Amino acid sequence: MPTYTLYHLPQEKLVDEKIFGALRERKKPRDYYDLYFILRKGMLSADQKKRLGKITQEIVDGSRKINFQGELGAFLPANQQAIIRDFPQTLERELHNQLSFRK
């Protein structure tokens, strides 16, 4: 018998809180990186993609103001370092691929 109970949010609620809560309000490097992870793992619902499409430029512009190498470099494993080297471009490319975003 387990000694603890684990409660977690449904995936859609978790993604909503991460993108439309934390990312838009805090704008921390880890929030942008989490968005990249969410996009790569195909975790967005159709509705979330539509809503994200409306704020994509805001996200891209915000990411350009952050030194991801300096902020996240010490916390990520070696195989993730290349991703954050040019992270704003990497994130924009992934948004484009997932949302058919056009400037």
Image (cartoon, rainbow, N blue to C red):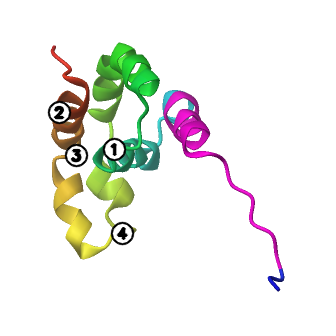
Question: Which of the two discs, 3 and 2, sits closer to the camera?
Answer: 2
- Boundaries of the magenta span: 4-22
Q: Position of residue 11 (x, y in %)?
A: 55, 45
Query: Which is more N-terminal, label 2 or label 4?
Result: 4
Residue 31 vs 85, above or below: the answer is: above
- The amino acid pointed to by label 3 is Phe
Question: Horizontal placement of 97 versus 2: left or right?
Answer: left
In space, the residues marked 1 and 4 are separated at their CA atoms by 26 Å
Question: Which of the two discs, 1 and 4, sits closer to the camera?
Answer: 1
Q: Which mark is residue 74?
A: 4
Residue 42 vs 70, above or below: the answer is: above
Q: Quadrant of residue 80?
A: bottom left
Query: Which is more N-terminal, label 2 or label 3?
Result: 3
What kind of element bears circle 4?
Answer: loop
- What residue lies at 58% left-to-right and 43% top-to-bottom? 14
Query: Which is more N-terminal, label 4 or label 1?
Result: 1
Query: Which is more N-terminal, label 3 or label 4?
Result: 4
What kind of element bears circle 1?
Answer: loop
Within 10 angstroms of label 4, few (less than 14), some, or many (20 or more) residues?
A: few
- The amino acid pointed to by label 2 is Asn
Q: Quadrant of residue 74?
A: bottom left
Query: Which is more N-terminal, label 1 or label 2?
Result: 1
What kind of element bears circle 2?
Answer: helix
Residue highlighted by disc 1: 42
In space, the residues marked 3 and 2 are separated at their CA atoms by 15 Å
Residue 103 vs 27, above or below: the answer is: above
- The amino acid pointed to by label 1 is Gly
